Amino acid sequence: MADEPNGKPPAGDGAGRQPEEQADVNKLLRASSGLPEGQIEAQEVRSVGVAGKVREQGTALAERAKKEVEAYKDPQQTQLWKSIFRVSHDRSDPRNRSLAILSNVFLHLHPAKINRDAVRYNFTWGMGGITFYLFIVLTFTGVLLMFYYHPTKIQAFRDIQYLEHDVPFGKLLRNMHRWAAHLMIITTWLHMFRVVLTGSYKRPREFNWCVGVVLLVLTLLLSFTGYLLPDDQLGFWAVTVGTNMARATPILGHEGPFGPQLGMTAFNDVRFGLLGGSIVDANALLRSYIWHCIGIPLVASIFMAVHFWRIRKDGGISGPAPVMLESEMKPVKR
Amino acid sequence: MAMAIPRPRGVSRKWVYLIAGVVLLGVLMLFVEDWHQLWKISSTPDNVPIVAMIPLVVFFTWLGVKQMKENDRLIDQLEADPQAAKTSHRKTAPWRPGWARELHVWPYLVRVEFLAAVIVTLILFVWSITLNAPLEEPANPNLTMNPSKAPWYFLGLQEMLVYFDPWIAGVVMPSLLLVGLMVFPYVDSNPLGNGYYTWKQRKFAVGMFMWGWFMWIILIIIGTFIRGPGWIWFWPGQTWDHNAVVYDRNIDLHEYLGISGMMGKMIFGGIVVGTFYLLGGLFFHWLMTRNAFEKKILARTSILQYLTFQFFAITVLLALPAKLILRLSPLHIKYVWVTPWFNI
């Protein structure tokens, strides 16, 4: 076999090895035996015969495997790795650092580079990012909770008890969902507070501020619709109090100014539409559930996409910007 | 108050404030009659977020104010020295020539985000392991909870029900609040302070927002900690007495003046509300013209911006505390304007 000249396919090689590879194996064999070329050929001549051939191929295969295993020690060079990660993660190359962000669907919300002072926690407080992270946590725990929950008057409360007492980690799951929701409201408010203190709502970010206000409302509504779902006294009365205010909606509520005059009753006004009935009952539970799990998260996701997109389009986060002096105010454009 | 007392050399103002705060807290503690009640309210699982929110708000306000002060000092320096203003990098963060102005997001920002996610996750786990989400008896329409409270973040609205009719407190005010928030960037005609903390350059805008922001938080705190059974006012530390009866006679403003007759009431109420808007407008106008800088900003403000701001400021920022004071004061005023269709 070793005698075969390069370029011709070796006869009887079941593995369909390429000639180049064969030559490589032979070279390896030579190198590992530590003998000069002439001698190894003499050895091979000696070992002709079926058993010898098998042994020889076995050795070659083992060597090849060894070589491949060696290559796997650097997983970043494998085809699998390269198919997933298009960019080398070699830190020394600034281009790679940029590509790490740009070529990753999850990270591409970021610019490749930012203001050096913007990574300071003091400026942003990280509240916007934390709010988004909490949304992800809530989606994750929420989906898991959905596996155990039926939005019906008969089962809802029992499902919560089942979650608390029988489902493995059910209590932890429910607690996390609850506290993450409360925390999300606080972080949303703090995010808004920071944006005001740094004047980040100013030109050109006015519209994004408005999108943010919508997101604040959606966050509150998400939390509120979730409040009813355990179907306990706390949720029931909180939602009763909350939706009773809707009765008093001007024009659209049956107790609001000009409502009765326009034909509003407890059975056709805006509160009826919210609850699917004139009291908080089975329909309210179902509506609450659908708004909570599907309706509002969908709408919120769209607004979030716009919010994040606009941050980038409006030139990234606002600062920390160099301070401007009073004397440098430009005349107003009208 | 602490300033008036001569302080010994070497004692910083911070310590004076701290000691004064501790003494004040101690005095307040003397008024607590029922510690158990106080603990019961603060440890109710759904109230824990508010208890946590108070120090968070204090901390972040401090963090913001600290940076405001730093930047304001820098602005003062640069305004005093025009030459330095030309060469300075104009930030309080350290800077040396030769440093890159921008950093790679990978890894310098991504690692911060990752760390934040890990810390938030840890906090959530610890919180969820140590404190259980509330679950009360199954919903029962025949058994009204007393007090029956909305979720804590809506308690501001519920508290407003004391001062306004439901259509204002539950529908009009929240809508105005949200629209007011949305128009905020459009009525703020001050170009300074875009992207950095400053008080000096944005006293008016920041002050207005903080006014609304703290009002909202105070309403939530009142709704949570002070309103007990029957939505009666119980000071923190007082026992929530379910049988308490409070003689609370609410009087409309016109009754004090002995005005009767529907027409008289309507005209009187209209005059009162109109006067309130006029005085409110004058008050905000005074705030907007109280020095040369504010006047300069006002000159940049369009008439539409000015009127929009005045409307929201008077209707949301001023009317709410005004009504709150009228209602809680010994006058016990319920309505200032009574008409056959609506009462304010």
Image (cartoon, coloured by chain):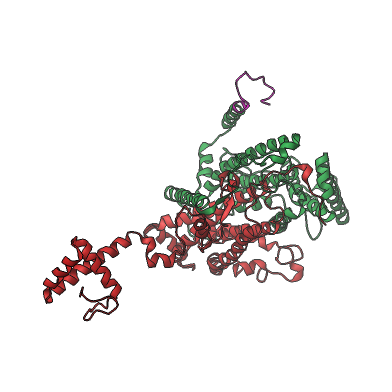
Q: Position of residue B118 (x, y in %)?
A: 46, 51
Residue at (28, 79) in percent of width and height: A8
Nearer to me, B119 or A35: A35
Nearer to me, A40 or A145: A40
Residue B166 shows up from this direction:
no
Q: Does B37 sit above or below residue A202?
A: above
Palette colour of chain A: red
Determine the main secondary structure of the stretch shown in magenta: loop
Q: Position of residue A98 (x, y in %)?
A: 53, 57
Nearer to me, A68 or B182: A68
Q: Does A115 sit above or below residue B68?
A: below
| Residue B35 inside the magenta-drawn segment | no
Residue at (76, 45) in percent of width and height: B322
Q: Which chain is green?
A: B
Which region of the structure is painted magenta?
Answer: B1-16
Q: Quadrant of the N terminus of chain B?
A: top right
Q: Position of residue A13 (x, y in %)?
A: 22, 78
Question: Is A320 left or right of A260, judged from the image as shown?
Answer: left
Residue at (61, 62) in percent of width and height: A309
Residue A141 shows up from this direction:
yes
Question: Is A178 left or right of A54, judged from the image as shown?
Answer: right
Q: Position of residue A103 (x, y in %)?
A: 51, 63
